[in-house]
Image: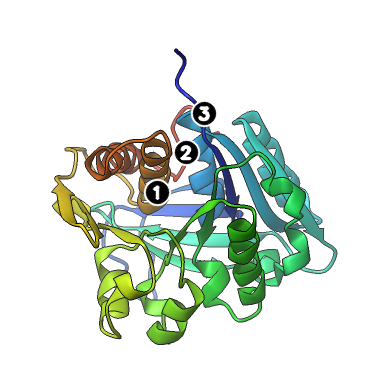
Amino acid sequence: MSTPRPGVVVVGDAALDVIARRAAPIVPGDDVHAKVITVPGGAAANTAAWLGHLGAETVLVSRVGNDHAGGYLRDTLTAAGVRCVFTVDPDAPTGCVVVLVDERGERSMLPDRGANARLCPADLDPAVLAGARHLHLTGYVLLDASSRDAGVAALAAARRAGLSTSVDPQAANLITDPGGFLDLVRGVDLLLPNAAELAVLSGFGDVLDAVGAVAVTSGAGGATWVDRDGSVSVPAEPADCVDTTGAGDAFDAGLLVAWLRGGSPREALLGGVRAGASAISQAGAWPRSLSPR
């Protein structure tokens, strides 16, 4: 019997990543040598690319500019097996993220969401959900007031269609209203934070009062699944850390594919850490076989 290919709709940001891997600490007002590449990125596009790579039937709903970058993202995602449902914004450019990677492989991001910030409820055609099993929403959509309604509408539409749902909060520093964020994700089946994001949200109350389960990543500390039945943890997979860009997005994809195929929480976590380890072992956020260099 063949392994089923779960259908996943991903809603969120698609962007270009300009990644600068520096060889030494930044010196204000002076120069430091760096290796710079421009590659496809954006949290939702990253997860979609990994989902497709891991065998899921994947649709990405996003908003891009009427520019070369938007067309490039559509072409590269389509070539990676992802069906793109893009709204082309006539006024805003495609998103762009400057990623600074230090000598340890740790990344810091300077995002300009561009057209992503203008995502609206009408950008998700309910027909896109037909035949899908799951909707995954990247948290930047909810964290930005200009696109928040689109995220809320996407989660509501998925529930009406009988899909399971997940949300990755994405950025601890941008969760300025933890209680409000938990209200936005209330009823979600699975929350996928890193340890810093979970700490911010847990400071407001019990996250499990809002969501069905939490799968939290802790970098080299591995990952843990927590629900009302208890918790289970797995260690991180060993990997040479080249660039942590997109590691959490890859983890999300690996976990979702295993979980949607009927895997236990432990099996889902193992799928996630395996994909995350692959992601950090290379420059850029996509699987090596998919990302043009």
* Identity, as a three-letter code, of the amino acid under mark 3: Arg
Q: Identify the residue shown where x is 45% and y is 30%.
A: 54
Between circles 1 and 3, the one closer to the viewer is: 3
**Which residue is disc 3 drawn over?**
5
Disc with the residue nearer the chain's start (3 vs 2):
3
Q: Is disc 1 placed on a helix, strand or loop?
A: helix
Q: Is disc 2 placed on a helix, strand or loop?
A: helix
Disc with the residue nearer the chain's start (1 vs 2):
2
Q: Which mark is residue 107?
A: none
Disc with the residue nearer the chain's start (1 vs 3):
3
Q: Identify the residue shown where x is 71% and y is 59%.
A: 63
Q: CA distance from mark 3 to mark 2?
A: 14 Å
- Residue 24 place in picture, x, y as percent: 26, 58
Q: Which mark is residue 50?
A: 2
Cβ–Cβ under 8 Å for marks 1 and 2: yes
Picture quadrant where residue 283 is located:
top left
Between circles 1 and 2, the one closer to the viewer is: 1
- Residue 241 place in picture, x, y as percent: 24, 44
Between circles 3 and 2, the one closer to the viewer is: 3
* Identity, as a three-letter code, of the amino acid under mark 2: Trp
Q: Identify the residue shown where x is 64% and y is 53%.
A: 161
Q: CA distance from mark 1 to mark 2?
A: 9 Å
Q: CA distance from mark 1 to mark 3?
A: 16 Å
Residue 202 in view (yes/no): yes
* Badge 2: residue crowd in 10 Å (few <14, some 14–19, many ≥20): many
Q: Identify the residue shown where x is 64% and y is 73%.
A: 147
**Which residue is disc 1 drawn over?**
252
141 vs 223, left or right, is: right
